[in-house]
Image: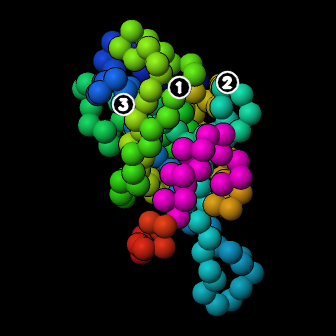
């Protein structure tokens, strides 16, 4: 059992312009491409995705941005709670609008959300985490991750992340 506890409820939730504000990240790591090579081998990027608790397909960790935290703190918290990873936020990837089918409330009756997504370089995989009883982690190469995204907006975020990787030297 995890000593960390996931936040629940909506009493601290942020809203803006009729949208629920969400923070999330694309957790990633580098893996050696050819482990048998004597020379410098190429590193490939893998991203961490988690199962959806409400249907098929995979997701990136994300959740409500609350009043007592910054958007980056919220993204880091969601990575810990949902995926059981810690790391460093390296950059903002973009804002993505979507409609939630499961999170409609008085402040956002239409279920409109705006997600701020970040690149998170993973430094630690936790052995136990708050949502491990309902979440499964999967490390995937980007090409497989694109095909596995449950939502189009997450696929778009992954494409922007890929462009960011090409433009940055994050090693």
Residue where numbered disc 2 is placed: 54
The spot of residue 29 in percent (x, y) is 55, 60
For marks 2 and 3, the one nearer the N-term is 3
Residue drawn at point x = 66 percent, y = 53 percent: 145
User: Left or right: where does residue 76 sit relative to residue 67?
Assistant: right
**Secondary structure of the residue carrying numbered label 3:** strand
Checking the image for residue 100, the label placed there is 1
Does the magenta segment cover residue 142? no
For marks 3 and 1, the one nearer the N-term is 3
Q: Quadrant of residue 40?
A: bottom right
Residue where numbered disc 3 is placed: 21
Classify the position of the N terminus by image quarter: top right
Separation (CA) of disc 2 from disc 3:
20 Å
Separation (CA) of disc 3 from disc 1:
12 Å
Residue drawn at point x = 43 percent, y = 30 percent: 113
Residue drawn at point x = 60 percent, y = 44 percent: 152
Q: 146 above or below 133?
A: below
Give the extent of the magenta segment.
Answer: 146-162
Does the magenta segment cover residue 159? yes
The spot of residue 62 in percent (x, y) is 48, 36
């Amino acid at each position: 059992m995890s000593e960390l506890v996931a936040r629940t409820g909506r009493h601290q939730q942020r809203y803006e312009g009729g949208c629920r504000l969400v923070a999330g990240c694309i957790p990633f790591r580098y893996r050696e491409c050819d482990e048998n090579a004597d020379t410098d081998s190429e590193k490939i990027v893998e991203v961490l995705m988690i199962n959806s608790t409400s249907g098929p397909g995979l997701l990136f960790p994300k959740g409500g941005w609350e009043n007592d935290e910054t958007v980056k703190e919220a993204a880091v918290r969601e990575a810990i709670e949902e995926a059981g990873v810690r790391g460093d936020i390296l950059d903002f990837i973009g804002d993505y609008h979507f409609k939630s089918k499961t999170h409609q409330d008085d402040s956002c009756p239409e279920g409109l959300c705006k997600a701020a997504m970040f690149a998170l370089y993973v430094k630690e995989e936790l052995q136990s985490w708050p949502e491990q009883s309902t979440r499964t982690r999967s490390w995937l190469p980007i090409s497989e991750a694109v095909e596995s995204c449950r939502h189009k907006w997450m696929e778009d975020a992954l494409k922007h992340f890929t462009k960011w990787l090409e433009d940055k030297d994050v090693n």
